[in-house]
Image (cartoon, coloured by chain):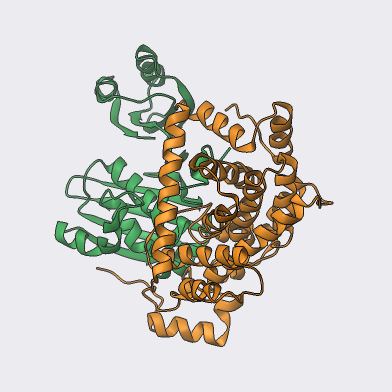
């Protein structure tokens, strides 16, 4: 089921005018901000399909920037997000693409600062519900509305078991899990959707497991 | 994931077997999948209802969008109702004006609750607040109206689409109107099956509706489509309560909507490239609002 909650249908509470092009766009921006873990210094946003054709009219651009500033869908500051970004010194650029994407409402966001950069592709599937389909070149399928753990690690034996054991120790149940890697023995990614809340101490413990590079959670 | 229902047939069968309202089944399912208590879920929906009330109130005072394309019509319709000569009936026009009010607030970048989307956010609250004056529901019954709407919307979203970019306006205002029709029936004391009939009758009459927003804005024709969607919902609810049934079962109507959406040209699915958006006036308005440039820009 793509839509899990009745509040995916009667909701979200949001600033208009479009649930997919405004609220969904803000959510894609906010997931990118969440995964980057801090305020990016710059952002390059590629828009595809209907996003590319109608982003100005729907406020898709100010909504994505609002999301990158950590605003929720109903935050009035979305309307002035460009000014707010300016105050924080965040540079941004929108690039409408003519190529086809898998979904008509697709945004690929590249964010960064002096330390690192990150890319993420999000699709807005309707009614404000989104999915993340790519992170740093890894294909994945993750809905923004549920608690999930993203673990970047070296592709070594035992890594997945160690992380799963750690979650089991804290009585956290795994609802859905995907693992992918770029090449054998190179960088790999675990996406773990869980049923319970993940506390910071669990993240800290996972980060200490050998061969784990980065741990991030997305709150549901 | 375990769910109580996957389609309308299962939803209605469960409601009939357990002698429960459709809103009750939706509440139970939400509790099941979220692990939250009934009170927490009711409270969140109560908050959404408050957002809807405030949006209608704001719209009835008169708002205008930044483009200037929409705003003020909800006020005009209310003033007309007050004169007492409305041909289509006060309740129907009241629903229309409150649906318009919500969408005018949405177009003006005000705060609304998507039902199921922002572009179609007027129909469910518009009909609710109009029918309220006749049926005099409790606050709980008004919240239940949203769960009943949500139950039907849940089936459409998971089995077809609620996105204009994926399925055209039939997926947005079409779905919203059919959801509202089903909820009106429950509030008026109809059976779960009558809710399903009202849903089918409404959606059947909105099949094929394209998404062709002028200048890509959620204004023209979106606001007036919500108006007509609201009237469609009220009339279909009355028909179902009178005992009229749909020859095509609800789930097959939903499936037909999905397939029509898939075969609809991309120009008519929220790209602002066809339909009303591509008329001479539509293009002129777009040029006037945005200049001629639609290319990217940077900061």
Residue B80 relative to residue B237: left or right: left
Looking at the image, which is closer to me, A100 or A69?
A69
Q: How many marks?
A: 0
Q: Position of residue B13 (x, y in %)?
A: 74, 32
The answer to which quarter of the image holds residue A44 is bottom left
Residue at the spot 71% in from the left edge and 34% down from the top edge: B10
Q: Quadrant of the N terminus of chain B?
A: top right
Q: Position of residue B211 (x, y in %)?
A: 59, 67
Residue at the spot 62% in from the left edge and 57% down from the top edge: B177
Residue at the spot 42% in from the left edge and 37% down from the top edge: B43
Residue at the spot 75% in from the left edge and 41% down from the top edge: B193
Q: Position of residue A163 (x, y in %)?
A: 36, 20
Residue that protrudes farthest toward the front in the picture? B84
Residue that protrudes farthest toward the right in the picture? B247
The answer to which quarter of the image holds residue A197 is top left
Residue that protrudes farthest toward the top in the picture? A169
Q: Is residue A146 above or below residue A12?
A: above
Residue A184 relative to residue B160: left or right: left
Looking at the image, which is closer to me, A49 or B233?
B233
Q: Is residue A46 above or below residue A124?
A: below
Residue B277 appearing in the image: yes
Q: Quadrant of the C terminus of chain B?
A: bottom left
Residue A80 relative to residue A132: left or right: left
Looking at the image, which is closer to me, A142 or B207?
B207
Hue of chain B?
orange
Q: Position of residue A47 (x, y in %)?
A: 42, 61
Residue B112 appearing in the image: no
Hue of chain A?
green
């Amino acid at each position: 089921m793509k839509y899990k909650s009745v509040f995916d249908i009667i909701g979200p509470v949001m600033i208009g005018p479009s649930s997919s092009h405004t609220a969904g766009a803000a959510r894609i921006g906010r997931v990118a901000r969440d995964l980057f873990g801090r305020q990016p210094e710059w952002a390059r946003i590629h828009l595809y399909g209907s996003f590319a054709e109608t982003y100005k009219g729907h406020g898709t651009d100010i909504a994505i920037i609002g999301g990158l500033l950590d605003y929720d869908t109903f935050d009035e500051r979305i309307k002035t997000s460009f000014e707010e970004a300016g105050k924080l010194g965040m540079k941004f650029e929108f690039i409408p693409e003519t190529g086809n994407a898998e979904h008509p409402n697709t945004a690929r966001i590249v964010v960064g600062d002096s330390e690192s950069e990150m890319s993420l592709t999000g699709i807005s599937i309707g009614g404000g519900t989104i999915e993340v389909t790519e992170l740093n070149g890894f294909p994945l399928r993750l809905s923004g509305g549920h608690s999930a753990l993203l673990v970047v690690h070296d592709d070594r034996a035992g890594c997945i078991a160690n992380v799963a054991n750690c979650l089991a120790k804290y009585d956290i149940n795994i609802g859905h899990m995907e693992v992918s890697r770029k090449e054998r023995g190179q960088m790999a990614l675990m996406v773990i959707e869980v049923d319970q809340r993940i506390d910071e101490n669990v993240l800290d413990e996972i980060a200490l497991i050998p061969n784990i590079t980065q741990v991030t959670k997305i709150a549901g | 994931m375990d769910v109580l229902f996957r389609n309308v047939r299962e939803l209605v069968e469960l409601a009939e077997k357990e002698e429960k309202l459709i809103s009750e089944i939706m509440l139970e399912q939400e509790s099941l999948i979220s692990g939250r208590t009934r009170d927490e879920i009711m409270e969140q929906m109560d908050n959404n209802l408050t957002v809807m009330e405030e949006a209608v109130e704001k719209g009835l005072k008169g708002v205008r969008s930044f483009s200037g394309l929409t705003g003020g019509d909800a006020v005009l319709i209310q003033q007309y109702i007050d004169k007492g000569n409305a041909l289509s009936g006060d309740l129907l026009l009241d629903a229309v004006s409150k649906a318009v009010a919500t969408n005018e607030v949405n177009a003006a970048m005000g705060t609304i609750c998507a039902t199921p989307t922002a572009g179609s956010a007027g129909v469910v609250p518009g009909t609710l607040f109009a029918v309220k004056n006749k049926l005099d529901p409790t606050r709980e019954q008004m919240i239940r109206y949203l769960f009943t709407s949500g139950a039907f919307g849940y089936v459409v979203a998971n089995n077809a689409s609620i996105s204009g970019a994926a399925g055209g306006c039939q997926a947005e205002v079409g779905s919203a109107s059919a959801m509202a029709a089903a909820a009106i029936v429950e509030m008026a004391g109809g059976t779960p099956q009558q809710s399903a009939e009202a849903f089918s009758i409404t959606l059947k009459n909105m099949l094929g509706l394209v998404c062709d927003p002028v200048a890509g804005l959620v204004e023209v024709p979106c606001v007036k489509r919500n108006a007509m969607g609201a009237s469609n919902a009220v009339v279909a609810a009355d028909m179902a309560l009178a005992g009229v049934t749909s020859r095509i079962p609800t789930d097959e109507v939903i499936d037909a909507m999905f397939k029509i959406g898939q075969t609809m040209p991309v120009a008519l699915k929220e790209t602002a490239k066809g339909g009303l958006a591509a008329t001479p006036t539509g293009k002129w308005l777009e040029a006037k609002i945005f200049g001629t440039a639609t290319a990217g820009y940077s900061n």
